Amino acid sequence: MTLKNTLVEFSQTILPQHALSQFVSKFTHCENVTWKNFLIRQIAMRYGVNWDESITQDLNAFKSFNHFFTRELKAGSRPLTTEKNAIASPADGVVSQAGKIESGDIFQAKGKSFTVTDLLGGDAARAEKFNDGEFTTIYLSPKDYHRLHMPLTGTLREMIHIPGKLFSVNGATTQAVNGLFAKNERVVAIFDTDIGQVALVLVGAIFVSSIETVWHGVVTPPTRKEVRSWTYDNDAPTLKIGEEMGRFNMGSTIIMLFEKDRMNWDSNFVAGKSVKFGEKIGQILF
C-alpha cells in the first residue's frame, strides 16, 4: 500500500463515522426555510444540478435538503429501454467497475478486491449462486438522481441489513481501502427473476444518513451490531423493470450481481462511463 493510500484510509478510520453521519442527517432533514434553501442552492450550484429535470423547481416546495436530494424527476426525463431482453441501469451515476466475478472475488480497483460472501453478509450459501457470474458497481455523486430502480422484473426473496463502517466511496477511497464495499454498512435485496437470482446491494457511506426500500421503508438508521435479514414468501412484492425499489438519503454506491451465463454487459459499459437510470446497459442471454 502506498503512503497516500495509507493516509486516506487512516484519516477516515479515526473519524467517528456514524456519529458524523447522524450529525449531518439532522442538518439535511432540518425544515428551517433559510437553512435548507441555502444548502440546496450551494449544492445545486457546486455540482451543476439540472433543474429542468426536476418535477419540483421551487426551493420553497422542498421540506428539507434531503427532500431536494431525493427529488422526483419529470415524466419522460429518463426513458426506460424498450429493447427486448435488456438490462436497464438502476441509477444515475458513473460505472466504477463491471465484469466477471472471478472465483468468488469482485474487482474493486488495482490490487483491491472483496468476496461475494463478505459482501452478502458472510453467508456462503447465499453467495454461491453468484460464483463466476457478473457484477457492476455504480457510484452516485451528489449531483445525481438518488432514487434506485429495478434493472429487470423480479420478485423479492430476501433482504439483509449488514452493519459496518462508513468510509467514503469516492475514487480515492476506492483505490485506498481494500474490500471497501464489504466493510461499509449496506442493505442487500435478492430477487428471483426469469434469469435466476439478482442481488442489488445498496452501500452506505460517510454522511449517507439513510437507506430505504419501497417495501420496507427506512432500513437504516438506526444501525445495529448484528446482521438482520427478512425473507419474503406469501407477501413477496414483485417489481417490474424500471420501478423504484429504494433510495439513498445522500449519495453512495449500488452493486448488482448476476448468476453465471445469464447476461452480458454492453461493450461500452465500462469503468468511467456515465449512465442514466433506465438506459440499456446489458443483455439477457436467454
Image (cartoon, rainbow, N blue to C red):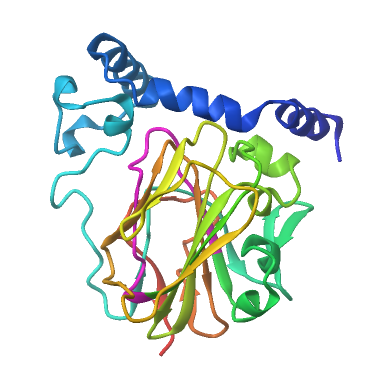
- Number of numbered discs overlaid on the protein picture: 0
Residue 153 painted magenta: yes
Left or right: 199 in relation to 146: right
In magenta, the rendered stretch is 136-155
- Kindly indicate the quadrant of the structure image that contains residue 278: bottom left
Residue 262 painted magenta: no
Q: Can residue 179 be seen at all in this image of the molecule? A: yes
Residue 197 on image: x %, y %: 48, 79
Q: Residue at position x 65%, y 71% from top?
A: 101
Residue 171 on image: x %, y %: 61, 39
Residue 65 on image: x %, y %: 31, 25
- Kindly indicate the quadrant of the structure image that contains residue 33: top left
Left or right: 166 in relation to 29: right
Is residue 86 positioned above or below 149 on the image? below
Front residue of this view, candidates 191 and 131: 191
Quadrant assignment for the N terminus: top right
Is residue 193 positioned above or below 145 on the image? below
